[in-house]
Amino acid sequence: MKLTRRHFVKSGAVVTLVAGSGVSALAAQRRPALVIYDSRLPRSLTYARTLPGPRLDIAHEDARLWRSLRDALPTGPVVGLTRWSDLVLVRGFAGDQRKRLRSHARDGGLFAWEIH
C-alpha cells in the first residue's frame, strides 16, 4: 500500500478520534486477537473491558520477565492502551515475532496502539 500524505493525515485523525473515546480504530472495526492493558491504570482497565476477546494484564509481567509476550503473540491484531514504556517493550517482542506497530495515538497520558 502506498502511503500518501492525505492517507496518513486521514488515518491519524481517525485513530485520534477513536482513541480519544477509549477504543482503538482496529477494535472499533473487528475483534482483536489480544487486548493488552494495565490493571493499575483505571483508563486502561476500562478500555480492556470494552473490547471483546482475550486479554492480557501486564501489571505484573515484569515479575514474569514478560514471558507471556516473549513466548508467542497470537495470530492477528493485538491492541492496547498502555504507558509509552510498555508499548516500547511490547513493540520489541512483536518485532521479534515479525509483527509491526501499525498505529499509535496519545490518549491523555497513555497510548492506544495496534500491532499485527
Image: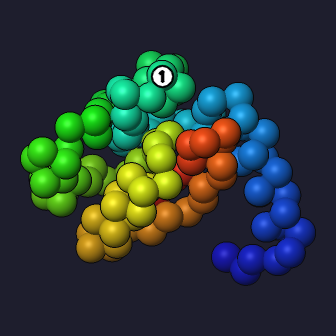
**On the image, which quarter does residue 1 sit in?**
bottom right
> Which quadrant of the figure has residue 71?
bottom left
> Residue 42 location, x and y as percent?
48, 22
Nearer the observer, 87 or 109: 109
Q: 102 and 67: which one is in front?
A: 67
Percent position (x, y) of residue 79? 46, 45
Q: Residue at x 20, y 37 (%)?
A: 60
Badge 1: residue crowd in 10 Å (few <14, some 14–19, many ≥20): few
Answer left or right for 33 relative to 100.
Answer: left
Placement of the C terminus among the 4 image quadrants: bottom left
Where residue 93 appears, as percent x and y from the top left, is 28, 65
From what the image shows, is residue 29 above or below residue 90?
above
**What residue appears at the point 86 percent right and 75 percent down from the top-left corner?**
5
Provide the residue designation for mark 1. Answer: 42
- Looking at the picture, does residue 7 appear above or below residue 18? below
The three-letter amino acid code for the residue at tag 1 is Pro
